[in-house]
Amino acid sequence: MTVKPIRNDADLQAAFRQLERVFQAPPDSEQADERDVLVTLIEVYEAKHYPIGPADPVEAIKFRMEQQNLTPKDLEPYIGSSGRVSEVLNRKRRLSLHMIRKLHAGLRIPYESLLAAG
């Protein structure tokens, strides 16, 4: 196993090509060890050079709505009246701490996403 540090995007592409070759390696093999090391190196490089911040609060709510086939009416227990739900979804009203707590508890939307600047 010859694994090199990932210093630039060309190294990253080479690491991905090598990862493709060893991805299906049997457990406890040298190739499986190489796969694990490559995955770690790739994750570290991407986190440093291509960070992904938390989701926008409204986008996080809409994503959960899509996942669970929810309508705006279904959000009323968490946000309030239909008018308030509409204001939040149309970005005319920010989420209150009370709404954030209810959305997290009821729909399991991560606090990190609900508290992100949106």
Image (cartoon, rainbow, N blue to C red):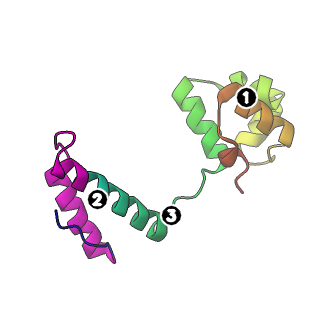
Residue 51 numbered tag? 3
Indicate whether 43 appears above or below 3.
above
| Three-letter residue code for mark 1 | Ala
Q: Label 2, secondary structure: give it.
A: helix
- Counting from the top left corner in percent of width and height, residue 103 is at 73, 32
Q: Which span of residues is magenta-colored?
A: 7-34
Indicate whether 62 appears above or below 93.
above
Asked whether the residues under the numbered discs 3 and 2 touch, taking CB atoms below 8 Å apart as contact, a structural biologist would say no
Residues at marks 3 and 1, CA–CA distance in whole angstroms: 27 Å
| Three-letter residue code for mark 3 | Pro
Sequence order check, earlier mark of 3 and 1: 3
- The residue pinned by badge 2 equals 38
- Counting from the top left corner in percent of width and height, residue 40 is at 36, 58
- The residue pinned by badge 1 equals 105
Q: Could you tell me how many numbered marks the image carries?
A: 3
Report the residue that reaches farthest toward the left.
21
Q: Main secondary structure of the magenta part?
A: helix
- Counting from the top left corner in percent of width and height, residue 101 is at 79, 35
